[in-house]
Image (spheres, helix red, strand yellow):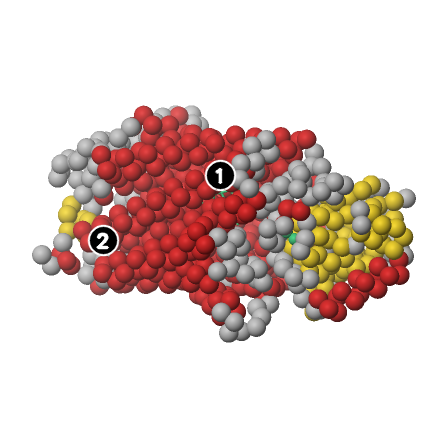
Amino acid sequence: MNANTDFRICPESGLKIHRPAEALIKANAVLAVVFLLVGGVLGLLVGLTRWPEVHLLPADAFYKVLTGHGINVLIFWIIFFEVAVLHFASAVLLNSRMATPKLGWASTGLMLVGALLNNYAVLVKGNSSVMMTSYVPLPADTLFYVGLILFAVGALIHCFIFLGTLVIARGERTYEGSLPLVSFGALVACIIAIFTIASGAVILIPTLAWNLGLISHVDPGVYRLIWWAFGHSSQQINVATHVSIWYLTAALLFGAKPLSEKVSRFAFFLYIAVLQIASAHHLLVDPGLSAEWKIFNTSYAMYLAVMASMVHGLTVPGSIEAAQRAHGLNSGFFEWLRKAPWGNPVFSAMFLSLVGFGVLGGITGVVMGTEQINLVIHNTMYVPGHFHGTVVVGTTLAFMGITYWLVPVLFRRDLILKGVARWQPYVFAAGMSGVALFLMGAGTLGVPRRHWDILFSSAGAGNGYEFSAAALTLMSLNGLSAVLAALGGAMYIGVVVGSILFGRKLAENEKVGTLMVRAAPPAEKYHNIGMGTITIPGTMVLVGVFFVAFALYYFINWKFLAETWGLS
Amino acid sequence: MTSISPPSDKHWWKEPIEKAELIWIAIVVVWGIILTLMMPFWHVYGKQNLSSEAYKTTPEVYMKKVQAGVDQYTVRTDNGKPVVKPPVGSDVYMLGRLWEWWPVLELQVGQSYRLHLASMDWQHGWSLQPANLNVQVLPGYDMVMTVTPNKVGEYSIVCNEYCGIGHHMMLGKIHVVE
Ligand code: HEM
Ligand SMILES: [Cu+2]
Ligand SMILES: [Cu+2]
């Protein structure tokens, strides 16, 4: 059969699925989960070592494992999954064939080789404990950089294939009018990814040349500036992707539509508009950068991106509320939310991701990205605390949720262990929120990140520093939370891998149930919902509470800052 | 029509915006402006602002300056390290290297000093505890900041940027006295 016309119709959603695209999506999703498993085990080892009473690994192993943890989860798990999401949001959602599936397989192969080489350098050769940031002039093995570069090249080709698919879909008129919102969000992620990978090349290629002795010097300040142009904007890819998944979940499970297309799309667009200089908030306590530069580049770039996320924070739950009300759950403030499918992990993961990302990741990101407040936060445990809120409770949990939907739809397997799946988002969110909160608490009390021995038992008599009992207790609580989070991660991997391997095969046209796809309410049902002229009063209450917490916590941190040494 | 289908109205950009969205956007924009203005506000009224003074340097040049301070103002030793007590208001030099902050300083509470920091080798994180003041220290950059200790006591400097296998043993000290 001609690969270009090899389609099947999804019995759940009615989407027309291009089989070669489907195969590639599945492969990337499976690779993602494998790297999550590797990175998650390493994360548990990190958490156990940083638990003062347990202190599991010796120092050299800890720094290897920490480097491997950061790279496997933040880069390999997330980006393999994002590749899958990109092709899903283009080929599948647009009922189109995918551009050049063969090249897609080659790119995924390149990414895999890169990931293996990098892991080989970090974990087997063991001479590349430079952390994921690999700040010069701390040297790593040549394969460390080569691996990252190959991985990035593969990801870049996937971006262009995605764009190619959009061109085909438009050319072959597989849809009418504008791109659906979710595909538009994926397009935003793709554009950011291209910028990001270009910045990555600008810094990693000279670093490789320096590593090979071809050039004598890479300036550490310049390295940080460009590395973070890549490191920060890659986080904007994650945000654009998981926000798209929130909208996707809302559309699938509730038949939700955007409150207004204009607002949601403009908010996505802002992520691109403010991209270039967002690295500034990683450099707030670096030498030599002027206050004007820092303020302009954090506020212009950061707060516009923050505004965009806050808007999605209203419009995503708002679109669910409006759809639920249109489906008839229109009484009081919260009937729509109470009667949401909390037992369906696709929904619970998505909603916990939304709340966790906003509360744990969002608020704290603004706080630590404030020029002066960064002085009391930079490189403390607060930083990993913050990004376990964004990239784990936010991005990772969103990806987990949509996997429960993709397994029956793409892999055509019924989920096994449905009871485990039902609880998994709650266990993972509880554990990871604990990690985020306790690390932030410890960071507020000064505990350093990337540090093997905060008891300083190895530093020699009279040399150490004694962290407060509260700080050490928070690190122990973090250890406990790490175990719970790892359990949640294991539940996810168990259910997903188990279902793919052993789940009951679904017959050609079999549906797994009504929980998977809900039809949109008819347009006229949207009239007269809500209270007065406010169609989404429940969401307004939620964002109001969020806003008050945000403002209070923000000003508390100015107070912390005011208590330290004077500095000018 | 949902978020995964093309907008039902082809001219979606002409659709009116929900009132709830408008209210929230207004709040968010005002808040963004407040967040932005807080930073210049603190430059004027706050006491903790990192200076942007920094110079290119090399390990050799910087070492000479540190050594000059040690030769001139050492008052005693502490665990084998010289304790330098510089004049109030003067330029004070400290370096980071594998794996220590050197030398130890003795400063007077409530007085200001021009503290210089640079690395001799890899990147380090100067983390003053329990004041919890943290700055990034790079090789090749001599960073100058005017510090004013606000409480008497013994402060430790931890390294909070990974700098190799001895990173967790990298420590330093500042005594703040009356
Ligand atoms: C079982 C799950 C996990 C546990 C227990 C865990 C625990 C930790 C802890 C305690 C740290 C801080 C270590 C330190 O600075 O000394 C850390 C670092 C980090 N974690 Fe996780 N984590 C988990 C999952 C994840 C996931 C899923 C992601 C990303 C999607 C992630 C991304 C990172 C990154 C990027 C770092 C920073 C590494 C560095 O400093 O270079 N973690 N993790
Ligand atoms: Cu150091
Ligand atoms: Cu260090």
Q: Amino acid at mark 1?
A: Leu
The residue under the point 58% across, 66% down is A222
Instruction: Give the chain letter at badge 1.
Output: A
Instruction: Name the residue tied to disc 1.
Output: A45
Looking at the image, is A332 positioned above or below residue B45? above
| Residue A155 visible to an observer of this rendering | no
Q: Are marks 1 and 2 on the same chain?
A: yes
Looking at the image, is A266 positioned above or below residue A363? below
Q: Position of residue A517 (x, y in %)?
A: 25, 37
Q: Is mark 1 within 8 Å of ligand 1?
A: no
Q: Quadrant of the N terminus of chain A?
A: bottom left
Q: Amino acid at mark 2?
A: Ala
**Among the two numbered marks 1 and 2 on one chain, the one whose residue lies closer to the N terminus:** 2
Which numbered disc covers residue A502?
none
Q: Which of the pair B10/A309 is nearer the observer?
A: A309
Q: Is mark 2 within 8 Å of ligand 1?
A: no
Instruction: Name the residue tied to disc 2.
Output: A21
Mark 1 and mark 2: Cα distance apart in space: 36 Å
The residue under the point 45% across, 66% down is A201
The residue under the point 30% across, 56% down is A108
Label 2 neighbour load within 10 Å: few <14, some 14-19, many 20+: many
Q: Position of residue A386 (x, y in %)?
A: 55, 43
